[in-house]
Amino acid sequence: MLVDWWQESRAFLPQQPRRGFDSLVVLVSWTLWKERNARTFDNISSTPTQTLAKVKEEANAWLAAGFRGLAAFAALL
């Protein structure tokens, strides 16, 4: 499942960018979880484009807070 994919994917990365990749996986998972909760409990749903925009916003907030490990992967969003 997700953890298996995550572990297999990060194994292909050099040691240095793994922290940023891990953060991106957590960030996307957290955003999807919040979207799921909004749909389930608040009857509010976002489009995939809106959800991706939320991931980008959060990634930019992490970068602004000084987490540089995500920088290489944030450019892919």
Image: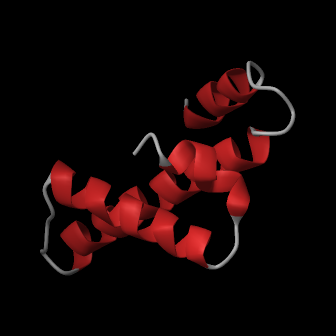
Asked whether 35 or 19 is in front, the reply is 19
Q: Is residue 69 left or right of residue 26?
A: right
Asked whether 61 or 33 is in front, the reply is 61
Query: x and y percent of residue 46 in the render?
Result: 15, 63
Image quarter of the C terminus: top left
Q: Residue furthest right?
A: 15
Q: Is residue 71 left or right of residue 45?
A: right
Q: Is residue 44 above or below residue 3?
A: below
Query: x and y percent of residue 65 in the render?
Result: 64, 79
Residue shown at the point (84%, 39%) measured from the top left: 16
Q: Is residue 77 left or right of residue 24?
A: left
Image quadrant in which you'd find residue 32: bottom left
Image quadrant in which you'd find residue 64: bottom right
Residue shown at the point (39%, 60%) measured from the top left: 55
Image quarter of the N terminus: top right
Query: x and y percent of residue 58 in the render?
Result: 45, 69
Residue shown at the point (75%, 39%) measured from the top left: 17
Q: Is residue 47 among what the camera can see?
A: yes
Q: Is residue 31 left or right of residue 59?
A: left
Query: x and y percent of residue 31 in the render?
Result: 41, 62
Residue shown at the point (58%, 71%) measured from the top left: 62
Q: Is residue 19 above or below residue 40?
A: above
